[in-house]
Image (cartoon, grey):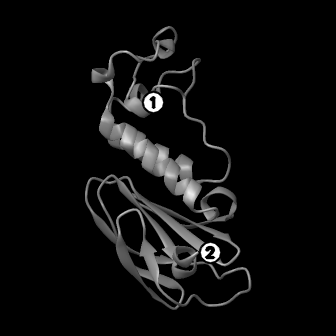
Amino acid sequence: MDSHDTARTLWTAGGDESALRLCTLLQMTMPGAPCIYYGDEIGMTGATDPFSRAAFPWQDTKQWNESLLAFFQRSGALRRQHPVLRTGDFKIVHAEQDIFAFQRELDGTTAVVVFNRGQQERAVDIALKADAHGAAWQGAFHDVWNDQAVEVQGQTLRAVCIPARGAAVILNAAALQA
């Protein structure tokens, strides 16, 4: 999202930490290798060079945003725990107003990642793409990011609750039993 040659993401987002969190979770659930520029995980900010190249404050942990660091660790752990978030097929399934969702699929595991960039909590229906074999979806789905059950009817996740400036990472039961 940023580097030594660009302004830091938190700076670019005008100090909006929720924007950095959404960008980070997006990066951790999209195809490809995520790249975190040192210091982003503790809330370092700064405009372009030389401010984007400030030294990491190893000796002054009071400067560290511990909550943000925990978020980075949690989103990285989620990616490591679920291979579908690293190498699964990618399909956009919803993009309307403040809601963006995509579906990942790998070896019978399905993940649906939903983002809400809006300032209000939203409940949305997300129509799923058929699995690799064209079969209808069955069984339980669970939002592992917010620890909530998600109802599926036919090809649709019903009334998925997405917090304001937040996200949901929904997995099918097969993924949770593995």
Position of the N terminus, as image quadrant, is: top right
Asked which secondary structure carries label 2, the reply is strand
76 relative position to 69: left or right:
right
Considering only vertical position in the picture, is 71 above or below 143?
above
59 relative position to 36: left or right:
left
Residue wearing tag 1: 40
Considering only vertical position in the picture, is 89 above or below 108?
above
**Image location (x, y in percent) of residue 66:** 32, 35
Residue drawn at x 43%, y 75% as measured from the top left: 142
**Image location (x, y in percent) of residue 131:** 67, 81
Residue drawn at x 60%, y 36% as measured from the top left: 35
Position of the C terminus, as image quadrant, is: bottom right
| Residue 112 shows in the view | yes
**What amino acid is labelled 1 in the image?**
Asp
Residue drawn at x 41%, y 18% as measured from the top left: 58
**Image location (x, y in percent) of residue 20:** 41, 39
Q: Quadrant of residue 135?
A: bottom right
Residue at the top extreme of this rendering = 50
The mark found on residue 109 in the picture is 2
Between discs 1 and 2, the one toward the N terminus = 1
